[in-house]
Image: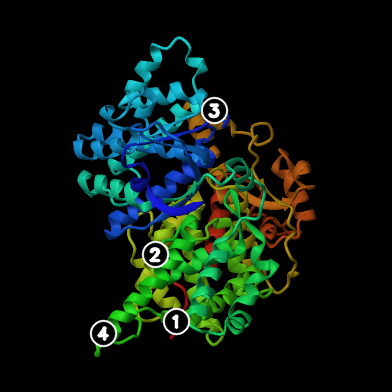
Amino acid sequence: MDAKARNLNQIFDGTISFQIPLFQRPYVWNAERNWGPLWEDIQELMDYQLRTMRSRTHFLGAVVLEQMKNVAGSIETHQVIDGQQRFTTLQLFMIAARDVCNQHGSEKFYERFNDLVANKASKVDFEHERYKVWPTNSDREAFRLVHAAQGPEGLEQALEDLPDWQDQNHQVLGGYRYFYRKLDDWLRGGLSQEEALPIKDRLEALWQVIGNGLQVVVINLDDEDESQVIFETLNARGTQLLPADLIKNYLFRRAQTDGRDIELLYEKHWKAFDDKFWRKEINQGRTKRPRIDLYLQHYLTLMLRDDVRSAHLFEAFKEYVLALEEQAAEQEDNANASLQSTQLTTQPLSIEEHLQFMSRYARSFRTFAVPPVGSRLAVFLSRLQAVDTATVFPLLLLACDQLLPKQQVEFDHFLVVLESFLIRRMVCGMTSKNYNRLFVDVIKALDKRGEFTAMALQEVLQSNTGDSVRFPTDEEFGQSILHKPAYQNLAQYKLRAVLEAIDQAQYIKKSEVLPLPPSLTIEHIMPVKWQENWIIPEAINSDPENRLTFIQQRNQALHSLGNLTLITSSLNPSLSNAAWSKKRPELVRFSKLNLNRYFHLPAAGETDPLIDWNENAVLQRGEILFSSASEIWPYTSVVVG
């Protein structure tokens, strides 16, 4: 058995044929589970290539091949024992790349990609040998169509002439369409942040990544290997190695080679990583990942000052270690060079220092899982769940390292600034799409300043312009609270977090300090179905034009923050669509929330400012909620010194 890591150029260049046996299953990969993640990985590599003019390798897994006995003079043929889904997908991608290059008028790159998917006609004896990969029986017709299509329009024209279209494999055709569309959009600048770069640079980046950046471990079996046994073993259930396992192996092997006491290094710096806490799977978006994977992604993003994707953790870590070693070697050659880093954190140089840094930042990350009860960090992390982003954690790791434990007050101010930025943008409906790049840029800006304070963070965030990065002002924040339909614009858990924060801010010394129950629901004070008990004034109702204007204004106010509150789920049905005269006493009687003290009934002889609940009343309460919200999440924090 021979196993080597090879790039796609090495695998598919030359006259060769990879055949998938008929007993293999048909092609089944799809967009959600397979094509999408693969495309995201490849696009990240291409964007990195465009941004830095440097290549990054990406490991795609392994394939197992068995060389077939060929007649003298025939082309070299291998049977794909394992990895047929991966090989087929890569071919669909490269066929799409070939056709997109042709569409954009690049004959050079068309020929290069064509050489990776098709053997020259003069070199083969049989029709199926024209294809670098020849799929299993049920996929062949669809595969022929894709090879000959020269683009989606050509494919659709060919399908119109096929009476038995229903017998074709939709997945093969779907994969080709998917990758063609993504590649075409990317080449036109529609999917990356480097929109202004010319098409020739994008074509070059595409070729460098596909031809040289993607790697597959090719396992070639010899005559003594039992291919079926190996196939079954590879596909048996087992525990997959985590990136942390690979990093651990890499570091300790190197430490052993350097003659270090690896038992001592393990006890001091790695032992904690091997407990269950780090292996526990944590929800992140729609997927679950081991906690240590999440930590390593944030740690490497901080150390590299660059966004690191989860699929690249081990490769990124190795590149990071080697790059620092090369940099140190260059500095040693220069007698006047300083080894001091320009960043706020010094960089590790030795293997032991890498272990020290990883364990040092891990202590802060562990605190994030169980923050001190009642601390500002606990409040921040709770509200961060509503913002629903993990991109701030590299910055948060740095804040913990730079400010704690000696500068606790400064750290708390830092959290206030960061939380204000995030919550204000959320309430104002601003995108979080570019947060990964934004917070890396924030770290770089703090590096450049050479100071790490809440005031520095505030100034950096407020210096940004553009809707994707700017810090909303009080005017924008107020307009969103007073006039935007928060109930429709924000998910329930986000809106509930805002209302809960305001409730806590409205605590006064005379009221009880009570933890908020987890089952609170959002209630419209003026109900969504208001027509039955919330009558339109007769003077307005009699005029069709005025009536229409009134309804539009009422419906706009209906979902704004000023018309929303929190109540228990058991109270909600009883309030429902009741009139204000019935709803208000029930709300005051049963709710102990600070948020609902506003609706108190006047004492005997007092004037009742809330005798009616209408659009003006909603606006007035909205102004009070804005006042509380702007104190919780200020645009300019009170930071002294």
Sequence-wise, the earlier of marks 1 and 2 is 2
What is the residue that sits farthest to the front in this orientation?
Answer: 72
Q: Quadrant of the C terminus?
A: bottom left
| Label 3 with label 1: CB-CB less than 8 Å | no
Residue 116, above or below 437: above
> Which amino acid type is marked by label 4?
Asp
Numbered label attached to residue 306: 2
Mark 3 highlights which residue? 22
Sequence-wise, the earlier of marks 4 and 3 is 3
Give the spatial CA distance, label 4 vs label 3: 60 Å
Mark 4 highlights which residue? 333
> Which amino acid type is marked by label 1?
Ser
Neighbourhood count class around disc 1 (C-alpha, 10 Å): few under 14, some 14–19, many 20 upward: few
Q: How many marks are shown on the rendered structure?
A: 4
Q: Nearer the viewer, residue 547 or 22?
A: 22
Dot 1 falls on a residue whose secondary structure is loop
> Which amino acid type is marked by label 2?
Asp
Q: Nearer the viewer, mark 4 or mark 2?
A: 4
Give the spatial CA distance, label 3 vs label 1: 52 Å
Sequence-wise, the earlier of marks 3 and 1 is 3
| Label 4 with label 2: CB-CB less than 8 Å | no
Q: Nearer the viewer, mark 2 or mark 3?
A: 3
Q: Is residue 399 left or right of residue 275?
A: left
Task: Place residue 487 in its image quadrant.
Answer: top right
Neighbourhood count class around disc 2 (C-alpha, 10 Å): few under 14, some 14–19, many 20 upward: some
The answer to whether residue 332 is seen in the rendering is yes
Q: Residue at x 57, y 49 (%)?
A: 618
